[in-house]
């Protein structure tokens, strides 16, 4: 991966020359592309922010503007306190994705990231390569009842991320994406980190479990039963013991 940084009037752009040979500010706006369409999804799977598919098939990108969530997001929508370039949400996530992609983990390949500084605050955006033919785990659960082999495989895949020290701050039924082969991809690493083993692993599993249970409350037709979670854990801990 070839990292390059270009200075702008109000900030900087970080990008991979092997993915995008040239970058400019207009690429962080839907109007800077010949084709742009919003990311949509059922059961809240499209996320909370301004996220767009940009570019043309066969190679498309995902453009995401960083938006705050939770209670603070009701007061401050997209501004973050400036504590240095390397600490910006966009640069931090870009570099984490780059490390994971280099390890062969199934994550979006980072293309570019930008921050724009406004006094003691900044806003941020990130562009990643679009993963073809994936859908949220929540969507797969709505389509069909997933068999035990799938849930065990999902558990093994999550454990591989944990074995590589990948902490996902919001691992849920939407950020886990499933491709046509039934393989897991993980998205949206805002606030994610690479950490040594610790209690965070169990906390992220508990968060995922709550998310799966919540999806069922949004649509009772969702195919998720208590035994599915047991199958997931069986796959996870089998992988842990054999690592």
Image (cartoon, rainbow, N blue to C red):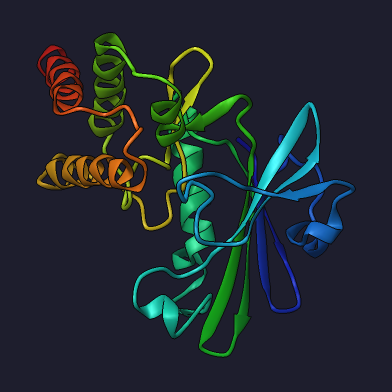
| Residue 103 appears in the picture as rendered | no
Q: Nearer the viewer, residue 128 or 152?
A: 152
Q: Is residue 1 above or below residue 147?
A: below
Q: Is residue 221 above or below residue 78?
A: above
Horizontal side of 191 relative to 119 (left or right) equals left
Q: Residue furthest bottom?
A: 119
Q: Nearer the viewer, residue 185 or 124?
A: 185
Image quadrant where one finds the C terminus? top left
Q: Position of residue 197 (x, y in %)?
A: 15, 39
Horizontal side of 198 relative to 42 (left or right) equals left
Residue at x 15%, y 47% (from the top left corner): 203
Q: Position of residue 84 (x, y in %)?
A: 47, 74
Q: Position of residue 176 (x, y in %)?
A: 40, 35
Q: Is residue 215 above or below residue 25?
A: above
Residue at x 51%, y 88% (from the top left corner): 120
Q: Nearer the viewer, residue 29 or 17?
A: 29
Residue at x 42%, y 42% (from the top left corner): 174
């Amino acid at each position: 991966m070839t990292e390059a940084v270009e200075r702008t009037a109000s900030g900087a752009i970080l990008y991979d020359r092997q993915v995008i040979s040239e970058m400019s500010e207009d690429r962080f706006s839907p109007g800077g592309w010949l084709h742009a369409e919003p990311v949509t999804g059922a059961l809240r799977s499209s996320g909370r922010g301004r996220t767009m598919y940009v570019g043309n098939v066969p190679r498309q990108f995902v453009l995401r503007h960083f938006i705050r969530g939770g209670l603070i997001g009701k007061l401050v929508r997209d501004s973050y306190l400036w504590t240095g370039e390397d600490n910006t949400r966009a640069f931090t996530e870009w570099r984490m994705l780059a490390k994971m992609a280099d390890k062969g983990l199934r994550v979006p390949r980072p293309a570019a990231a930008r921050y724009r500084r406004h006094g003691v605050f900044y806003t941020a955006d990130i562009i990643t390569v679009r993963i073809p033919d994936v859908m949220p785990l929540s969507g797969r659960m709505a389509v069909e009842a997933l068999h035990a082999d799938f849930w065990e495989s999902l558990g093994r895949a999550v454990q591989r991320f944990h074995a590589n020290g990948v902490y996902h701050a919001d691992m849920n039924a939407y950020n886990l994406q499933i491709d046509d082969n039934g393989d897991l991809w993980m998205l949206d690493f805002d606030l994610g980190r690479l950490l040594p083993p610790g209690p965070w692993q169990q906390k992220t599993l508990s968060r995922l479990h709550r998310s799966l249970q919540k999806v069922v409350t949004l649509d009772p037709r969702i195919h998720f039963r208590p035994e599915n979670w047991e199958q997931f854990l069986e796959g996870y801990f089998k992988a842990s013991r054999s690592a």
